């Protein structure tokens, strides 16, 4: 009788375990995957908008000149896709089917309203992303970018397309994010096939106590590379072309490099 009871008990415990695991799995599936962080698409170039670049501000001026092309690309050319992604964090996802989630919302860019639909397809430990954008009284359902990342949203890629009028691949993005240390890196690569094809800009935030942020810009036309190091709190920094290095202080004034 005791053996039979133990057998029944084992079966019951196994059933409870199966039900519990099934419940956990169902709960997991009932949650939308986390959005890749904003740092997966956005490079902070704001310091180069506020700093000066003439007279005794020559060195920071060189840094401004080094990123001016990418500043215009990211703030003007890609304003709509970037804004549409930022806005996603203000909305909740709705389940479209068993493995698909959608964020649907409006976003206003330069006084024009766009409707964005961000879709996430979950496959085991990976997520595929697609952003469809429609303009009020204009183009409809243009897929502005696609991407993929791991289920924890710690690394991934994006592919951005140029425009509804010219829907060719424009930029490829690779990114990584460490939530524990709050460090990350991102690289924009020109894949347009145009004059600047192969050019790139990368940006990262590190744990370096002196310069906790860096930028690297490669110009495929001039075949030049500039590296910028920056302290995001004091704004002190430097720029180097691999041969010479130029520095500025917390007020963006030129200073001798302490190297």
Image: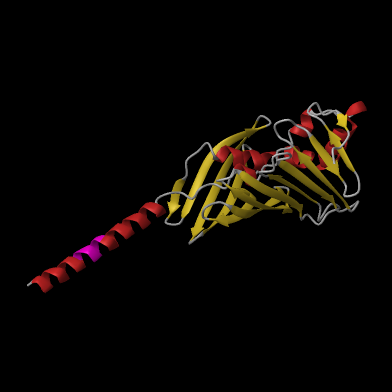
Q: Nearer the viewer, residue 124 or 170?
A: 124
Residue 91 position within the rendered picture, expressed as x and y whole percent measured from the top left: 50, 38
Q: Is residue 33 above or below residue 256?
A: below
Question: What residue appears at the point 91 percent right and 49 percent down from the top-left corner?
Answer: 243
* Quadrant where the image shows the N terminus: bottom left
User: Per the image, is 31 magenta?
Assistant: no
Of residues 9 and 74, which is closer to you in this image? Answer: 9
Residue 74 in percent (x, y) is at 74, 41
Location of residue 21 with respect to 35 vertically, above or below: below
User: Farthest left residue?
Assistant: 1
Specify whether residue 138 is in view: no
Residue at the spot x=88%, y=31% of the render?
Answer: 254
Residue 22 % position (x, y):
32, 59
Residue 227 seen anywhere in this rendered image of the structure: yes
Q: How is the image coloured?
A: secondary structure
- The answer to whether 195 appears left or right of 201 in the picture is right
Q: Position of residue 199 (x, y in %)?
A: 81, 52
State the quadrant of the C terminus.
Answer: top right
Relative to 156, is 107 above or below?
above
Magenta-drawn stretch contains 13: yes
Question: How many numbered marks does the figure carry?
Answer: 0
Q: Which residues are magenta?
A: 12-16
Q: Residue at x 45, y 51 (%)?
A: 96
The rendered magenta stretch, by its main secondary structure, is classed as helix
51 lies above or below 189 = above
């Amino acid at each position: 009788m005791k053996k039979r009871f133990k057998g029944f008990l084992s079966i019951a415990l196994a059933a409870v375990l199966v039900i519990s695991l099934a419940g956990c799995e169902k709960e997991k599936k009932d949650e939308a995957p986390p959005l890749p962080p904003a740092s997966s698409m956005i490079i902070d170039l704001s310091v180069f908008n506020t700093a000066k670049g003439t007279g005794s501000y020559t060195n920071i001026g060189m840094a401004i000149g080094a990123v001016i092309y990418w500043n215009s690309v990211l703030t003007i050319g890609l304003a709509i896709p970037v804004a549409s992604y930022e806005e996603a964090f203000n909305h909740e996802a709705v389940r479209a089917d068993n493995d698909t989630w959608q964020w649907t919302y409006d976003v206003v860019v330069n006084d024009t309203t766009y409707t964005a639909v961000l879709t996430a397809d979950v496959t085991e430990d990976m997520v595929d992303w697609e952003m469809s954008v429609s303009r009020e009284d204009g183009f409809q359902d243009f897929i502005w970018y696609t991407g993929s990342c791991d289920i924890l949203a710690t690394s991934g890629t994006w592919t951005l397309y140029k425009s509804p009028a010219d829907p060719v691949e424009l930029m490829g993005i690779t990114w990584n994010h460490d939530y524990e240390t709050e460090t990350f890196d991102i690289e924009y690569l020109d894949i347009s096939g145009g004059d600047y094809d192969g050019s790139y800009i990368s940006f990262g935030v590190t744990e370096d106590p002196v310069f906790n942020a860096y930028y690297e810009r490669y110009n495929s036309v001039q075949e030049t590379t500039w590296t910028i190091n920056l302290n995001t709190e004091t704004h002190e920094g430097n720029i180097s072309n691999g041969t010479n290095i130029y520095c500025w202080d917390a007020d963006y004034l030129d200073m001798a490099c302490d190297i």
